[in-house]
Amino acid sequence: MKDDDFSEFAASRLGRLSRIAFLLTGDHHGAEDLVQSTLEKVAEHWKRVSRMGSPDAYARRILYNEHVSVWRRTRLETSTDTPPEPAAGDEAEAVVRRLMLRRALAKLTPRQRAVVVLRFYEDLSVTDAAHALGCSEGTVKSQTSLALTRLRQLAPELGDFSREVVLT
């Protein structure tokens, strides 16, 4: 029965965890590996996690911590390619904008990237983001500020976008 509970949990959260992992890694294969290792760790401690009543928060924290740990172990260099020139048409412009944002996010530190994803993709409060990352609220605030400043430096053409993100 307990295996069925974990299987249901994993199946229902797989899509969301995969999207978050992709935003963190910027790579489909890396995201798959990150989700797999996260679910392995959640499964390993499922009995305790399910009793605590917050398996989502536990899985999210494992996901972010595992991402930072992998980065520390591998120290991979990120690509410095320049983004393509904007193409005509609204959809093409949106795709180019997403590519520029993706490349800029890839140049942030893992902690900064995690804070940006938690705060602006998952729409968590400073308090919830601090809890998910296991750090203080001040750290979340400072990392958010540093990350947005860095994004503005890396991709000034996204300046309007990064100001919109701060306002939302």
Image: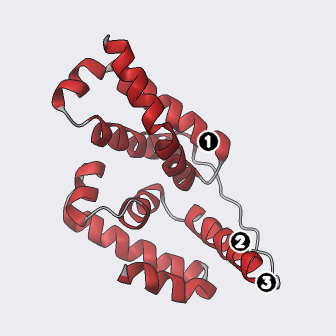
Q: Amino acid at mark 2?
A: Val
Alpha carbon of mark 2 to alpha carbon of mark 3: how far? 10 Å
Instruction: Name the spot of residue 86 as percent of width and height, x first.
Output: 78, 83
Marks 1 and 3 close (CB-CB < 8 Å)? no
Q: Nearer the viewer, mark 1 or mark 2?
A: 2
Mark 2 vs 3, N-terminal side: 3
From what the image shows, is residue 86 above or below residue 40? below
Q: Position of residue 147 (x, y in %)?
A: 44, 72
Disc 1 packing (10 Å; few <14; some 14–19; many ≥20): some
Q: Is residue 72 visible?
A: no
Farthest residue to the left: give it. Answer: 52
Locate the N terminus by quadrant. top left
Label 1 – label 2 distance at C-alpha: 22 Å
Where disc 2 sits, the SS reads: helix
Residue to which mark 2 is pinned: 95
Q: Which class describes the residues within 10 Å of circle 2: few (<14), some (14-19), or many (20+)?
A: few
Closer to the eye: label 2 or 3: 3
Q: Which residue is mark 1?
A: 30
The reply to whether discs 2 and 3 touch (Cβ–Cβ < 8 Å) is no
Please, is residue 115 above or below residue 104 in the view?
Answer: above
Q: Which residue is pictured at 36% across the width and 43% down the height?
A: 60
Q: Residue furthest top?
A: 1
Q: Which residue is mark 3?
A: 89
- Which quadrant is the C terminus positioned in? bottom left
86 relative position to 23: left or right? right
Residue ID at (38%, 29%): 9
Report x, y in % for residue 23: 54, 55
Residue 116: x, y in percent?
Answer: 42, 65
Q: Could you say which quadrant of the image residue 153 lies in?
A: bottom right
Task: Check disc 3 and report its element: helix, strand or loop.
Answer: loop
